[in-house]
Image: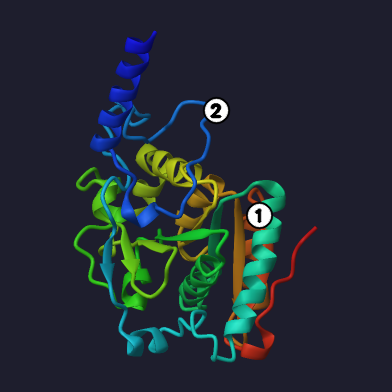
Amino acid sequence: MEKIRQALDRAQRERAALHPLPADEVADTPAPRSGPRPFAAADHEPVTGRPAAPIALRPAREFAPPAAQLEQSRLVAGDASHPAAAAFQMLRTQVLQRMRSHDWRLLGVASARARDGKTTLAGNLAIAVASDPRHTALLVDLDLRRPRVASAFGASVEHGIDDVLRGEAAPDACFLRPSGVPGLALLPARAGCADSSRLLAAAPCHALLAELKARYVNRVVIVDMPPVLEADEALTLAPLLDAVLFVVAEGRTARDDVARSLHLLRATPVIGTVLNRSIEAIRSEAYG
């Protein structure tokens, strides 16, 4: 028995040396697995039918977001002195409470039209979630026609999630970590693409989102979605998410557009709406 135990211990040490815990996820707690892993390093036959590259087996590339760029993008949740920071913390608490009650980890941020502020809201919410010591946050850019997450944080992108979905890059080559925001990682898109609808509907996207959701129990995955009313991408993506947070731009979003968007998203839980472009009016209104 002693020889068997020593052999098992030696095998475990060898596996740990081959697949160390990545530095960008040291605060995350691996989720227990109750079924097959759809997009994991150990799977040689994922749902796509082709070998899948492992997710985040090396540290995310760290970069320093320029302060001027964060200010221009209105990513202020990390600045405790900013008047809007408390509002984003309140929104974070409401969102986390609702998600925790349903064991949800994958949240989309949507709007009716482009330029309603969904990327700004998604970025600030991700920063606020990452500042909670009980959670980490991953911000994923799936507005593939007009990706803005990287530019909002002032990051240069060598490989993006669009490359991953085409099979041209491994996921672990795409993660970015903004310095000064512990617990936050980005999975940006590299460039706008005309075939975004096809990419979002294909099996690799389904498998990747399932893996990102299931891998760590304390990580909240926030997805910057395409605008609901401008193409079919949001409707393709919504069923893959646990829930959606809907952004309304004060003085810009038409009432009919809100009603149409919520009707189109009706198959996915909408946990609330956020009124954007007004510090005093930023709020979350939970649905029953």
- Bin the neighbour count of mark 2 within 10 Å (Cα to Cα): few under 14, some 14-19, many 20 and up: few
Q: CA distance from mark 2 to mark 1?
A: 20 Å
Q: Residue at x 37, y 12 (%)?
A: 2
Tag 2: amino acid: Ser
| Mark 2–mark 1 CB contact (< 8 Å) | no
Viewer-proximal residue, 146 or 101? Answer: 101
Q: Is residue 236 above or below residue 119?
A: above
Report the quarter where the N terminus lies.
Answer: top left
- State how many labels appear: 2
Please state the horizontal and vertical placement of residue 55, each as a whole percent of the image: 32, 44
Circle 2 or circle 1, nearest the eye: 2
Which residue position holds label 1? 99
What residue sits 23% from the left and 53% below the top?
A: 173
Q: Tag 2's secondary structure? A: loop
Q: In front: 256, or 129?
A: 129
Q: Which disc number belongs to residue 34?
A: 2
Q: Residue 11: x percent and y percent?
A: 29, 23
Quadrant of residue 91 within the rendered picture: bottom right
Seen as rendered, the residue at the extreme right is: 288
* Residue 53: assigned label: none
Q: From this view, report whether residue 57 is shown above or below residue 25.
A: above
Apparent side of residue 209 relative to residue 276 in the rendered image (left or right): left
The quarter of the picture where residue 181 lies is bottom left
Percent across and percent down for residue 133 are 55, 64
Q: Is residue 23 visible?
A: yes
What residue appears at the point 62 percent right and 69 percent down from the top-left corner? Answer: 92
Which quarter shows the C terminus?
bottom right
Amino acid type at circle 1 is Met
Task: Classify 108 as above or below 6.
Answer: below
